[in-house]
Image (tube, grey):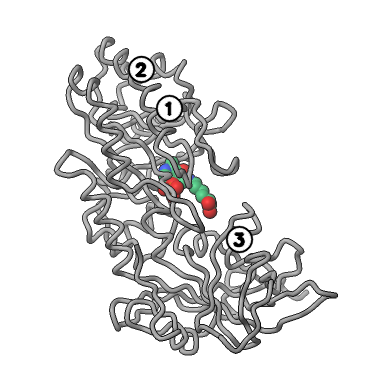
Amino acid sequence: MDFFRYQDGELYAESVPVKQLAQTYGTPLYIYSKATLLRHVQAFKEAFAGRDGLVCYAVKANSNLAILQLLSQQNIGFDIVSGGELARVIAAGADPHKVIFSGVGKTEEEIEMALEAGILCFNVESAMELDRINLVAGRMGKVAPISFRINPNVDAHTHPYISTGLKENKFGIPVESALAEYQRAAKMEHVEIVGLDFHIGSQLTEISPYIDAIKALKKLIRQLYAAGIKLHHLDIGGGLGVTYSVEAPPLPNELLNAAYAELEDLFDDVGTLQVVVEPGRSIVANAGIFVYKVEFTKDNLGKKFAIVDAGMNDNIRPSLYGAFMNIITVEENPEADLELYDVVGPVCETGDFQGKNRQLRVRPGDFLAMRGSGAYCSAMASQYNSRPKCAEVLVDGDKVHVIRERETYEDLWAKEKLLEQE
Ligand code: LLP
């Protein structure tokens, strides 16, 4: 559920008309709803229902400082994948002791930075990474808390680019070599085993792949305990899907209840582990809309285009994944004809579209709003075609906060240098 609604034919973000925001702050514009964001966090917290759990928001989905600040005020943790994300969560005021560090390519500098900050755990994705963490921690006279990301080889039934739990994907270590790696880690002086984790993909709309993964890993956990290796937590990753069109993904409490039911016999045998989740999209996607203006309409021998002021540089999801994202008009336009449009941007690429074959009533000058744009949109934006990055605002009831200023042309080349003239 979200707080973007039509009232008297006009779209509102909480109590503020979206048209007013578009006119005041310009377009293209990302608009977030604080109440929606907090509601989604609450849904995860409540899903644990008094059980020992930790929500670690996946920063990559939307890393705006104000959003991270709001989330850290909810006392949740963070899942990061780079030194930059660690720097962001610290700058946003988060507690580093609730930070989990995922990713296949952690550099020595990033490992050092994370050890210095005192993070909760490294999710180790390879044998060489384990050696590197042990080495860096040793050099610093520290002990690094680690978990192995295990690749359970299950099909998440999602887009191939965002499926991560199959053996042909680069992520994690195979179940088959996990016991040996845990045993190697147990002998190391500068690492401490604290957990086990998996993340099998994103935009999952069913519970069954999670359950398949848990089933595959229960056996491994029993083997670990038999070998004297105890765990503090089990991290079941992120990946819970959202509704972009007709999907009906499970709710956080449905996912966690099913996970706990599957884990019951294991917990009876080895004791209860803390369960960690790493949701990104399910927290932010539907807390954001992306608003842009129709510059022109165009009819190429019957094929109609609505040319908008937002490009694939601002939101690459439709171009990169062929992702469907719902496009609605900011005002209902009963007087405009209902036509089938490709909604395309100004970038010089055929793949620059926000939506294809959309039934819309639009005229030049109208604003369109794309739903579900809080996750992986602004976060994946670039300046391609020398287009300054968009402004972002957060609405809280009738209050509006600018949480990212629109970039200027000078920002485009701020880090570039002209050659010295001879
Ligand atoms: N944990 C790990 C280790 C991850 O790699 C990811 C996402 C998450 C958690 C959060 O997953 P979520 O709950 O957001 O599904 N750019 C793509 C999505 C890439 C997801 C990458 N990993 C998109 O726009 O659909």
Q: Position of residue 361 (x, y in %)?
A: 61, 80
**Residue 220 circle label:** 2
Q: Which quadrant of the structure image shows residue 268?
A: top left
- Which residue occupies 69% across, 77% down? 307
Compared to residue 368, the image places residue 220 above or below, namely above
337 with respect to 378 (left or right): right
The CA distance from mark 1 to mark 3 is: 30 Å
Tag 1's secondary structure? Answer: strand
User: According to the image, label 3 marks what residue?
Assistant: 316
- Which residue occupies 50% across, 36% down? 156
In the image, farthest residue toward the right: 301
User: In front here: 256 or 245?
Assistant: 245
Q: Amino acid at mark 2?
A: Leu
In the image, farthest residue toward the top: 226
Tag 2's secondary structure? Answer: helix
For marks 2 and 1 on the same chain, the one whose residue lies earlier in the sequence: 1
Q: Is residue 144 visible?
A: no
